[in-house]
Image (cartoon, rainbow, N blue to C red):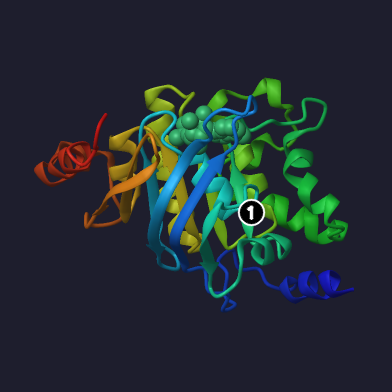
Amino acid sequence: MLRAAKINEDFGSNMISDTNEFNTGIIIENLSVQFPDKNGGEHVEALRNINLEIKPGEFVSLVGPSGCGKTTLLRTIADLQQPTSGTISIGGLTPREVRLQQKFGIVFQNPVLYEWRTVRRNVCMPMEIMGIPKKERTKRVTQMLELVGLYNFGKKHPHELSGGMQQRVGIARALALRPKILLMDEPFSALDEFTKEKLHLDLQNIWSKTKKTIIFVTHSIQEAVFLSDKVVVLSPHPGRVSAVVEINLPRPRGLNIKDTMEFNSLVSKVRNSFEGV
Ligand SMILES: Nc1ncnc2c1ncn2[C@@H]1O[C@H](COP(=O)(O)OP(=O)(O)O)[C@@H](O)[C@H]1O
Ligand SMILES: [Mg+2]
């Protein structure tokens, strides 16, 4: 009952951007996550004492080498992993409350599309699960495919698409339920450099149109600096925040910003912030 009423509120709105006042600011305090060792040995300390503040609508990257806890941090924010200690508050709500309200959209490195479904029906899937009426689903799928530049590919099947296009389908699918917070875990890592750069520009555009808070995980310093308002540098064993670097480069950013001194000095600043790597 409650859920149906909540979804209905969104009907009639043709806006892609979110207008209601859900506060997507995230405050993480003294967060630690440990994994018990299956053989009874030492536990793995994936994250130690993380303190971090993310403002509503901010684009924040988590950057660090493999194993430093990036995915664990993302999963803990999304309520897919429980903290050992510490708290996460999202506009005063717990991650669980935010998850139950479907305010998270998640994009993984591998988009995991259903081969037997067309692009349109892949994007539609979460809305079908949520029981959103057909007319609204059709409208939103069209809107999302336009947003990610795949409007003409709706009738194709995943195997007919390039890797970059498949990842765009994953983004459209994550946005279809109109999440307030988009969590992206190395979404472009498997793509070639040219495709990646195009997606960077498009993601910047999508972010500025939809005004979502985005947390973007990557091991690429350049990618993090190009996309973000703020880069959080994580160091491994145990995973902890070694630095938070503000990226005050003007927007919208074009690819040629990578040739500027300002960009390169920020890349160096992030690189020099790693501890013990
Ligand atoms: N489910 C799990 N069980 C045990 N250890 C885990 C689990 N998930 C992650 N880890 C460990 O936690 C650390 C951080 O992992 P992860 O968050 O995946 O890092 P990253 O995404 O930065 O590569 C690693 O040492 C990893 O082996
Ligand atoms: Mg990971």
Question: On the rendered image, what quadrant is the N terminus found in?
Answer: bottom right
Q: Does the residue tagged 1 have its C-beta within 8 Å of any atom of ligand 1? A: no
Q: Position of residue 242 (x, y in %)?
A: 27, 46
258 left or right of 129 in image: left
Nearer to us in this view, 52 or 174:
52
Query: Looking at the image, is 6 positioned above or below residue 107?
Result: below
Instruction: Find numbered disc 1 in the image and state the secondary structure of the residue it sits on.
Output: loop
90 left or right of 227 in image: right
Q: Quadrant of residue 200?
A: top left
Most distant residue in the right direction: 1
Q: Residue at x 77, y 73 (%)?
A: 6
Q: Residue at x 57, y 50 (%)?
A: 76
Nearer to us in this view, 7 or 52:
52
Nearer to us in this view, 130 or 77:
77
**Mark 1 residue type:** Asp
Most distant residue in the bottom direction: 21
Q: Quadrant of residue 100?
A: bottom right
Query: Looking at the image, is 26 positioned above or below residue 143?
Result: below
Q: Quadrant of residue 269?
A: top left
Q: Residue at x 49, y 23 (%)?
A: 190
Nearer to us in this view, 89 or 17:
89
Query: Looking at the image, is 11 positioned above or below residue 267?
Result: below
Residue bearing mark 1: 79
Q: Position of residue 75 (x, y in %)?
A: 58, 46
Question: On the rendered image, what quadrant is the C terminus found in?
Answer: top left
